[in-house]
Image (tube, rainbow, N blue to C red):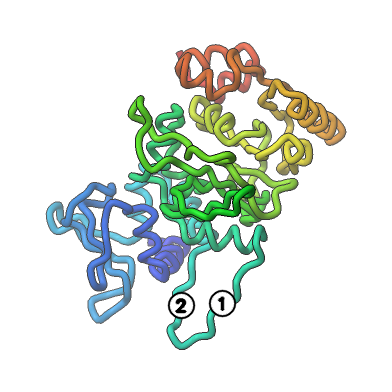
Amino acid sequence: MTGSASELARRLGDHAEAVCREYLSNGHRSGNHWIVGDVRNTRGRSMHVRLKANAKGPAGKWVDEQSGEHGDLLDAIRESCGLIEFRDVADEARRFLAMPRPQAQNPGAQRQPAAARGSPEAARRLFGMSRPVTGTLAERYLAGRGVLLTARERALRFHPGCYYRDLVTGEMQTLPALIAAVTSLDGRLTGLQRTYLSSGLDPSGKVGKAPIADPRRSLGHLLGNGIWLGLDPGTPVPVMAAGEGFETMASLRTVMPALPVAAATSANHLAGLTFPTGCRRLYIAADADAAGRHGIERLSQRAGEAGILALALRPQLGDFNDDLRHLGPTHLAAWLSDQLVPEDAGLFLPSG
């Protein structure tokens, strides 16, 4: 193992249980081990991951008693995410290590002061208390919207009991929620958006939004930042797409999985989105309402001033999620092909 690989494996071992909860989410803790079916996150009991170093070896080492496979947490990330190149595995490990995680509370330590309501710190704590979407209501909700994202999308989490306060009555309740991280270009979590979900299935057998007045709420510092999908912090982004809504941008990402996209959460925030280094072309997902048009016009103006070519992408129906759900991914890809620069169509859309 190279020096950089061994150092990454050691650092992952320092957070072995958090790594397992993220990438081997179908398992569970038992004593000093995480028990799961295999390194590809199958349900079962064959694979054991050591969570704390002991006389038998360092934290993070694992063995599959059925297959005889063994390795470290870099191997677990590679196999569970379906990665091939070491560079991609290392990038994924570094992304994980940069994420906020809840700190273990020392029973004798002074209680951590409460974070200010609506602050970036409150957002970081809530994100840290959330868990991966795999196998949760959030995953079923996204699938019901036609949104199929890979396990590498680090921005999305699930919280089974997120507080919701009715702004009219003041009544408080807890609801399951899809949690989407709002980050700066360097990967710092500055806020988040909660999409409150129903705890049961709708008549069509899908998970929908909770039956409340405003099932989507944001907190933290949002201006200039966004819900980024496919952004590698610090890496130039020559071509990207941006829009208001998360589901709109996730729909584009579903049919163009190599294209970095940002959801700004509102028209005003879209107008103020910060451009990544090296951006040459910016596709803006169109929104039909007046506020949406203003956001697009202002963002286009700022892009032009920065020497970036801004191009609008227009849906066939109400929005791109409507297109994805009702017309299908193949039709949506064909619809987009006529709106993209030919070079980008060849690069980001599926061939054939």
Q: Where residue 162 appears, x then y in whole percent?
A: 49, 54
- In front: 81, or 296? 296
- Mark 1 belongs to which amino acid? Gln
- Residue name at image x 42 percent, y 36 percent: 141
The circle on residue 165 is none
Seen as rendered, the residue at the extreme bottom is 108
Q: Where residue 83 appears, x then y in whole percent?
A: 39, 43
Q: CA distance from mark 2 to mark 1?
A: 9 Å
Q: Where residue 322 appears, x then y in whole percent?
A: 53, 20
- In front: 17, or 109? 109
- Looking at the image, residue 203 lies above or below residue 173: above
Seen as rendered, the residue at the extreme left is 66
- Residue neighbourhood size for the residue with mark 1, other residues' Cα within 10 Å, grouped as few (<14), some (14–19), many (≥20): few
- Mark 2 belongs to which amino acid? Gln
- What secondary structure is found at the residue carrying circle 2? loop
- Residue name at image x 25 percent, y 68 percent: 33
- Quarter of the image for the C terminus: give it: top left
Residue at numbered disc 2: 105
- In front: 129, or 171? 171
- Looking at the image, residue 52 lies above or below residue 303: below
- Looking at the image, residue 258 lies above or below residue 178: above
- What secondary structure is found at the residue carrying circle 1? loop
- Residue name at image x 44 percent, y 74 percent: 104
Residue at numbered disc 1: 112
Q: Where residue 214 appears, x then y in whole percent?
A: 59, 40
